[in-house]
Each structure stands twice: as structure tokens, then as C-alpha cells.
Image (cartoon, coloured by chain):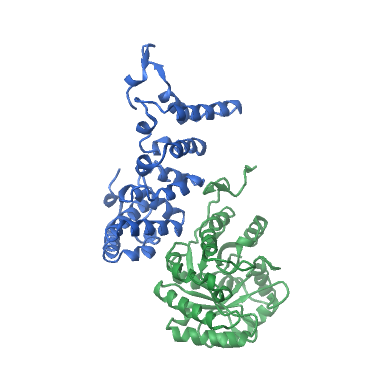
């Protein structure tokens, strides 16, 4: 990922420096500085091929994450959980997305899982992508995580946005048979309706197959398969 | 005719209204936060409302080629309800957001102490957040409410050109004109103020700091009253530049003081979604 410093112009870098300095000195200021980040520091895709920041967080998302990390140094864990909860509750769609992106960088254990749950209940694909980052990969229970993956397939969120998809679904190791069953049922429903099965679903089913032919047509046990 | 409706409650209006407004020349609106026609029972109800002003409604307007901005405040009526008072503590979070172009509607409803306290506090917030203020003047005891409003504005230290005093009529126009605040007039289908009386006020007082809105909401009101006032101005001999000044340049100059107006034309895409909700509700454009 391109470093945030390299994505900002001189003025944006200077402004972000001022803002992080301000919240380091007085963490409560983040309540009013966080919403204003896009118009004061900068906004836009970090990767031109990913304009919505599904896989690579947008410039304003990364700048907001930097601000939360600066403020976090001044709070104990309880205060941190309360404050990021308030930033999320009172945030617009962009701010919520940035809070979700920040979770991976914060020492909150599983105390912020309610924010992930809120994002996964909604239909904003940018929120779903941001919610399934490394924090969810580490902390989300198996049922909720599987439904998150399924929701990606339903809503068109690329599985590339799902952190740890290989590790958690057991690709190349112990396969997640329940996830495989859910995705197969989804694919069957799409076929029954005469609709296309998304390429990501086909890919995942292929990866989760108990065994599959190798390039020579021989069957390879799944524990010998190579991760993507 | 290009029109900026500086006061309209679009959350209460239909997509037919958006289409008719666009056809009449409306390209931008400001939606002030107000009450819902019935009382809210908690602060959380305000937060959901603010979220919709900043999110879904802005998205919905854009689908019809109209730029949507909002103002945020605890309104005068609900300033009297202790269940809603904590909203004041959360306002700074919302006043910092893109798309918020003023503090409002603030002011008086029944001229109570609680209303005055909330009004003064929010005038201070406008100063802290470098935002203009939209002030609602009361329907009952309007002259006294307007007089007290101007006293509080003067005491706040805010420059008068940062304050728009709204819902004026023949009996309050002189008070506000003398204060150097902006003058707002809401044009309704029958009561309060109509487009022909509005034109007489413009003829008598000139066009400086004059702002006309429809204030359309969930009650009997007309989102095309701005356009109808423009037509009444033409009929009375005002030229196109006069109409453009009142219906576009004046509100742009007032809310532009926030430096958060977005007025470039929208390439509207009705298939776009906001938080997964399409304005087409599953339909596809022909």
C-alpha cells in the first residue's frame, strides 16, 4: 500500500501533522477534527483502480486512522472503546468506514465487535469491506465471519477485501466445511434462478473443495494444496 | 432561471417534488434541521434525523440533479423538552461535517427561558465552528420574538452578515433590515406570505440581503414557490439578473460563508446506491 505521506500533497501532510499534534495534546478534540479530515487534509482513492477503497483504504480513511491512533495514546482501553463507539455512532458513512479501518491498529481486544456487527448488518458495501479487515479476521466468531463472507458474495464485495480469507476458511489446511456448504447453497440458488454465479464464489468453492485434480489430472489431498 | 432554495424540508417530500423542482430550475437546496411535526422523545431520535440529512437525503437529492446541504441544530420547539437537551452536547460533532452549511434552525417558538438558553448556546457554537446561523422567527408574537432575536444576535458578537433571520413579513422586515442581518422570507400557499406580497417588499426594500424560500415541509406547502416568486418578479418588471440575484446569488453568498457549499452540476446516476438503498427501489431506468 502506498504510504499516506506519499499520497498527500505538502499542504495535506502539514495539516495532518497539525491535526495529529492537536489530538495527541487533547484527545477529546478528535470529536470535531475527525469529521473535517477530508476537507482539511485531502480525499480520494489511494489506488486509482479501487475508487471506493474496498481493498486499499482511501486517502481520507488512512488520514482518519492516523488521527484515531494519535488520540488513542491518551486514553485507557475503556475510554478508547467508548470514544471510537461515539465516533462511529455520530459518524457519517465515510467516518464510520474509517473507524472500522482503525480497529486493526487499536488495542481494544474484542470490545469493538459491535461496530463490526453494525457494519455487517447494513448494506453499504464499503462498510462491509472495511468491517472484514484484520480485526474481524482475528476476533469475529465463526458463524458471523462466515455470514460476512457470504454477504460479500451477495453484495459484490470482492473477497480480496476479506483479510485472512485463506487462513480462516482453511484453504490449503483444514477446510471450513460449513462455509463450503453455505457458498455451495448460494451458488445452487443462483443457478436455479438462471443467474450467474459470481467468479469469487466459484473461486472460493474451488479452493474449499475436499480434493481437486491437480494440473496433471491426479487427485491431490487438500492438505497438500498450495495457498493462493 | 437557476434556483437555490435556502430552506426546504425535503425529507418530507416525494420524488415527484424533486423532479418538478429540477424542471423549474432548482439546482441546490439547504435543508434546515427542524421538528418532525410531532415531538421526539429522545436525543437518539435527533441523531438518526441528522444522519438522514447528511446521508440518505443528500444522496436522494443528487439522484435528481440537485445539490443538498443541511443546517444542524436543536430547534426552538424541542429546546423546551428536557429529554432532548443532551443533543446540545453532541452538536459539535455534527457541525464539523461536510455538507453542514449553518447552525439552524435556532430561535424562538414560545419565547421561553429554555428556548433562549439553547438559542444563546447555539449562537456561541456558530462562532466556535465558523458557521453562519439560520434563525427561525416565531409564528406567534412575531415582532417581539424578532426584536429579542436581534438583541441576542448583537450580544453574541457574531457579525450580523453571518445571520439569516427567516420567516419575515411586512411587520418584521424593517427591524431586520436595520440590523444588517440577512432577511429570509418563506412563501406559502395561503397564509403568512405570498409571492405577490414578496414582490412588493422587494420593490420597497431593494434586493440587498434578500432571500426567498419555500420552507416546504410535511404541511400544506409548495416546493415551487421559489420559482413562482421569480415569475412574479418578472411580471412586476424585475429583470433576469434581479431574479438570479434573489433566487441564486444571495443564498449562495450567505451559505457560502461556510466554505462548504458544493454547487458544481451533478451527473446524476439513478442506479447508484447509498448504504445499499437505491432511489429506484429495485426498478431499472428505461
| Residue A165 drawn above or below residue B105 | above
Q: Where the N terminus of chain B falls, by quadrant?
A: bottom right
User: In this view of the protein, which residue sits in the foreground, A10 or B280?
Assistant: B280
Quadrant of the rendered image containing residue A209? top left
Q: Where the C terminus of chain B falls, by quadrant?
A: top right
In percent of width and height, residue A2 lies at 29, 45
User: In this view of the protein, which residue sits in the foreground, A123 or A223?
Assistant: A223
Residue displayed at 42% across by 59% down: A86
Left-right relation of A1 to B258: left
Quadrant of the rendered image containing residue A144? top left
In percent of width and height, residue A79 lies at 34, 60
Q: Chain B: give its colour.
A: green
Residue displayed at 53% across by 30% down: A186
Is residue B39 in view? yes
In this rendering, the count of numbered labels is 0
In the rendered image, what is the letter of the chain coloured blue?
Answer: A
| Residue A175 drawn above or below residue B73 | above
Give the residue furthest to the right: B190
Is residue B177 in view? no
| Residue A111 drawn above or below residue A27 | above
In percent of width and height, residue B84 lies at 53, 70
User: In this view of the protein, which residue sits in the foreground, A77 or B181?
Assistant: A77
Left-right relation of B22 to A30: right
In percent of width and height, residue B70 lies at 52, 65
Left-right relation of B35 to A207: right
Amino acid at each position: 500500500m502506498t504510504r499516506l505521506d506519499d499520497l498527500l500533497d505538502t499542504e495535506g501532510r502539514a495539516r495532518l501533522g497539525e491535526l495529529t499534534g492537536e489530538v495527541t495534546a487533547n484527545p477529546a478534540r478528535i470529536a470535531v477534527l475527525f469529521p473535517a479530515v477530508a476537507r482539511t487534509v485531502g480525499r480520494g482513492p489511494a489506488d486509482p483502480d479501487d475508487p471506493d477503497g474496498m481493498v486499499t483504504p482511501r486517502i481520507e480513511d488512512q488520514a482518519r486512522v492516523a488521527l484515531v491512533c494519535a488520540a488513542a495514546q491518551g486514553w485507557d482501553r475503556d475510554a478508547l472503546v467508548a470514544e471510537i463507539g461515539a465516533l462511529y455512532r455520530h459518524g457519517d458513512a465515510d467516518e464510520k468506514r474509517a473507524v472500522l479501518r482503525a480497529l486493526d491498529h487499536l488495542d481494544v481486544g474484542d470490545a469493538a465487535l459491535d461496530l463490526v456487527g453494525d457494519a455487517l448488518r447494513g448494506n453499504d458495501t464499503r462498510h462491509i469491506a472495511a468491517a472484514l479487515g484484520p480485526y474481524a479476521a482475528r476476533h469475529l466468531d465463526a458463524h458471523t465471519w462466515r455470514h460476512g463472507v457470504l454477504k460479500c458474495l451477495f453484495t459484490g464485495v470482492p473477497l480480496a477485501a476479506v483479510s485472512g480469507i485463506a487462513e480462516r476458511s482453511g484453504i490449503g489446511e483444514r477446510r471450513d466445511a460449513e462455509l463450503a456448504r453455505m457458498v455451495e447453497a448460494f451458488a445452487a440458488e443462483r443457478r436455479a434462478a438462471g443467474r450467474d454465479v459470481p467468479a469469487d464464489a466459484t473461486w472460493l468453492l474451488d479452493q474449499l473443495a475436499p480434493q481437486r485434480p491437480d494440473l496433471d489430472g491426479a487427485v491431490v489431498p487438500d492438505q497438500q494444496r498450495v495457498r493462493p | 432561471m437557476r434556483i437555490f432554495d435556502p430552506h426546504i424540508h425535503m425529507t418530507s417530500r416525494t420524488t415527484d417534488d424533486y423532479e418538478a423542482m429540477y424542471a423549474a430550475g432548482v439546482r441546490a437546496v439547504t435543508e434546515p434541521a427542524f421538528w418532525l411535526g410531532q415531538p421526539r422523545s429522545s436525543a437518539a431520535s435527533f441523531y438518526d434525523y441528522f444522519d438522514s440529512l447528511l446521508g440518505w437525503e443528500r444522496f436522494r437529492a443528487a439522484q435528481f440533479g440537485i445539490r443538498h446541504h443541511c443546517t444542524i441544530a436543536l430547534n426552538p420547539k424541542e429546546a423546551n423538552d428536557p429529554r432532548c437537551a443532551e443533543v446540545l452536547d453532541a452538536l459539535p460533532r455534527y457541525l464539523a461535517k461536510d455538507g453542514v452549511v449553518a447552525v439552524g434552525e435556532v430561535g424562538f417558538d414560545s419565547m421561553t427561558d429554555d428556548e433562549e438558553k439553547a438559542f444563546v448556546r447555539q449562537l456561541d457554537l456558530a462562532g466556535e465552528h465558523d458557521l453562519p446561523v439560520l434563525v427561525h422567527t416565531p409564528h406567534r408574537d412575531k415582532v417581539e420574538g424578532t426584536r429579542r432575536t436581534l438583541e441576542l444576535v448583537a450580544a453574541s458578537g457574531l457579525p450580523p452578515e453571518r445571520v439569516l433571520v427567516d420567516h419575515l413579513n411586512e411587520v418584521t422586515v424593517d427591524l431586520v433590515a436595520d440590523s444588517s442581518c440577512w432577511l429570509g422570507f418563506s412563501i406559502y400557499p395561503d397564509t403568512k406570505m405570498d409571492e405577490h406580497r414578496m414582490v412588493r417588499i422587494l420593490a420597497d426594500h431593494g434586493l440587498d440581503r434578500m432571500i426567498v424560500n419555500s420552507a416546504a415541509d410535511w404541511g400544506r406547502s409548495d416546493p415551487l414557490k421559489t420559482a413562482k416568486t421569480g415569475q412574479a418578479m418578472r411580471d412586476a418588471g424585475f429583470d433576469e439578473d434581479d431574479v438570479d440575484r434573489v433566487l441564486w446569488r444571495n443564498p449562495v453568498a450567505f451559505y457560502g460563508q461556510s466554505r462548504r457549499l458544493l454547487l458544481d452540476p451533478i451527473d446524476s446516476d439513478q442506479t447508484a446506491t447509498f448504504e445499499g438503498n437505491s432511489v429506484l427501489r429495485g426498478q431499472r431506468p428505461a
